[in-house]
Image (cartoon, helix red, strand yellow):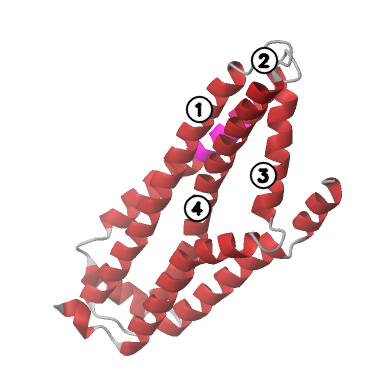
Amino acid sequence: MKILAMPLNDVVAFGCFLLCWLGYGVVAKWLAKRKPSLITMVGVFRERWMKRICQRDSHIADATLLSNLLRGALFFASTTVFILGGLIAILGTGATVAEVVAQLPYSVPSEAWLLEFKALVLIAVFVFAFFKFTWSAWQYNVLSIMVGAAPTAAEADAAALARYVDSAARIATLAGDSYNHGIRAYYFSIALLGWFIDPLMFLSLTLVVALVLYRREFASQMLDSLRHAAP
């Protein structure tokens, strides 16, 4: 198999990419249980939002907010389809792509089959993103239905109301998590582009993307603002 003939630099860079991309979510969840994170703090406000929904009769503002969230997921889903179309178009043209890449500054020559393998990996990342964005859109649709069916304090007892709020907040969190997974795939796809030029650039960009994601989730000014606003 040609994959077994992949240069060592490419193997190490690709292994680091898989470790960072697939492992980041696991590590982030583990850290979020031990320190404040952007995701957990947003979850606090999602629960507050669902409580407010059950305290008012008019949901016009809530419908507008949900529409914006749904539109964002659908925008990325449709954009991903166009990206996939472009990537699939270059399959089978490895020799031509190799000639073009060889003209780029600092590029390392690669065989045609290796460039097509890199394109396949990039396609796999965007397929993953597409499924996450469409699933997020479906979850926001379900949340819209729950908001429309939300009981008020006069219609349900405190225990039933608490269960409804908890379920709605959980669905909102699941939709947000799916969206975040899609966005992370976009981030790491930027690192993958560096692989077409040089495996060391690919490795460096992968580490930079992982660092940027960590900083935004656990050490950003937005997180400080959310912590300040929460009780």
**Residue at the spot x=72%, y=28% of the render?**
51
Q: CA distance from mark 4 to mark 2?
A: 35 Å
Q: Mark 4 is on which residue type?
A: His
Q: Mark 3 is on which residue type?
A: Gly
Q: Position of residue 2 (x, y in %)?
A: 17, 78
Q: Position of residue 137 (x, y in %)?
A: 48, 35
Q: Which quadrant: the N terminus?
A: bottom left
Disc sitting over residue 156 in the figure:
2
Tags 1 and 4 touching, CB below 8 Å: no
Count neighbours of disc 1 (C-alpha within 10 A) and say few if under 14, some if 14 to 19, many if 20 or more: some
Q: CA distance from mark 3 to mark 4?
A: 16 Å
Count neighbours of disc 2 (C-alpha within 10 A) and say few if under 14, some if 14 to 19, many if 20 or more: few
Q: Main secondary structure of the magenta part?
A: helix
Q: Position of residue 217 (x, y in %)?
A: 66, 60
Magenta part of the protein: which range?
67-74
Disc sitting over residue 43 in the figure:
3
Q: CA distance from mark 1 to mark 4?
A: 18 Å
Upstream in sequence: badge 1 or badge 2: 1
Disc sitting over residue 181 in the figure:
4
Q: Mark 1 is on which residue type?
A: Asn
- On screen, residue 7 above or below 62: below
Q: CA distance from mark 3 to mark 1?
A: 18 Å
Residue on which disc 1 sits: 141
Q: Nearer the viewer, mark 3 or mark 4?
A: 3
- On screen, residue 59 above or below 194: above
Q: Secondary structure at mark 1?
A: helix
